[in-house]
Every structure is written in structure tokens, then in C-alpha cells.
Amino acid sequence: MTLRERKKLRTRQTLIDTALEQFTRRGFDGVTLDELCEAVEVSKRTFFRTFASKEDVAMAPAQDLWTLFLAELESAEPGGRTLLEMERDTLLAALERAAEEEGWAGRMALAYALAQRTPSMDGHNRHFCESTTRSALDILWRRFGLGGPDDPRARLAVDMLVAAFHVAMAGWADGPEPDPADLAVRLRDALAALPAALTLVPGEGGAAGVSSP
């Protein structure tokens, strides 16, 4: 990267770290955009060249992961796998790449925790999730002819991947030291549970001692 690009990347990372620290300590609504920019010593103009809103900077770790997922999906090959298996391996590859950035796991856990208690962040996350799903479907249609308007299978496969990721995140983010390898294991386990979930009959498949979500 050029010097300009490296400087821009450092500013972006400082904004993310500072935002997550201050939002966690003072509450998302307790920190104004002016205060955030002052803490990082950048202008609001610089901020808006990088992020669209406070929600955008707070959700950056998750958005970076799914941006990597879309990039990986552009070159993924089925290799005899089902669509869901290909998507699983693509997301795991994206997770491995995201984890190469020092401190990413901690930022991801903070962003997730903030979204759980901040309605505007949760809404922003849902909007981004839908946008990412549509982008993934565009790639699947363009590359493999999957996901046409009369064929819901590709959409369901992407939705199941996203749902499994949320299940994995729910337990992972509660841990004292978030570990990307543990998140990968949780994601695999959540996806492996899908077939049983689709055939589960209430009153017949429950396990003793298992509490409700």
C-alpha cells in the first residue's frame, strides 16, 4: 500500500477502536459523533469519508467479515459440495482471514454485545445482513445460475448460513477471551445441527435437561 493508503487504514482502525471503547464504556447514545471525532483528532468530513454513521463504525468488525465472505464467494468452487457446505467453507475462510488482523476477535465481540442492547445498531445490522444476502445471491446467480425468482433454495441456503452464524455468535461473544478458532467450531456445530432441526417434532425430540433458548 502507498503511504496515503496506510494512513487512511490507520485512521479507520483508530476510529473503530475508539468508538467501540467509548460506546462500551459510556453507552452508544452517550457518545456524540463530535466527541468521537475529537477523541481521534479527525474532522467529521474525514469520518464521513470512511463511515456513514456511528452505527456503521460500531459494526465495522462484522461488516469486514461479511465483506471478506463475499470476496471469497467470488472465487469459491463447489468441488462436489452442497451449496450450504460451500458457503460454510467460504465463511470459515473469511473468518480465518479476518482473524489475521490483530484484535479483530475482541472488536467483534464488543460490536456484537453493543448491538444486543442498542436498537439502532441492531436495525443497522439487519439492514446490512439483508444487503449482504442479496449480494451473495447475485454472486450465486451470476456464477452458478442459482437463486432465480422462482427458486427459493439458494435464498434459504444463505439464510440458514446467516442463522447458524448468529447462533454461533450468541455463545461465543459471552466468553471472557473471544477466540476465532472457537467461533469456527461453534459455526460448524450450528450448521451440523440444521438437519435435525428441520425434522424435529415437538414433544418427540427433546433432550432431558436442555433448557429453552
Image: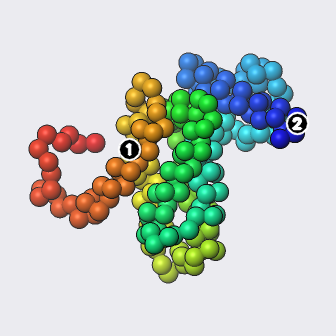
Q: Quadrant of residue 3?
A: top right
Amino acid carrying mark 1 in the image: Arg
Q: Residues within 10 Å of mark 2 (few under 14, many from 20)?
A: few
211 relative to 100 in the view: left or right = left
In the rendered image, residue 91, in percent from the top left (x then y), is placed at 52, 53
Q: Residue at x 49, y 61 (%)?
A: 87
Q: Position of residue 84 (x, y in %)?
A: 44, 64
Identify which amino acid the numbered label 2 is placed on: Arg
The residue lying at 53 percent from left, 29 percent from top is 106
- Under tag 1, what secondary structure? helix
**Residue 179 placement, left or right of 102:** left
Which quadrant of the structure image shows residue 2? Answer: top right
Task: Determine which of the numbered discs, if any, sits on residue 186 in the image.
Answer: 1
Where 205 sits versus 80, above or below?
above
Left or right: 187, with 49 as reference point: left
Q: Is residue 147 visible?
A: yes
Which residue lies at the image location 11% right of the left edge and 44% below the top edge? Answer: 208
Q: Position of residue 149 (x, y in %)?
A: 54, 78
Q: Pointer 1: residues within 10 angstroms few (<14), some, or many (20+)?
A: many
For the N terminus, give its image quadrant: top right
Q: Quadrant of the C terminus?
A: top left
User: For the point 49% across and 57% down, which residue is it?
Assistant: 89
Q: Which mark is residue 4?
A: 2
Foreground pick, 120 / 84: 84
Distance, label 1 to label 2, CA atoms, is 39 Å
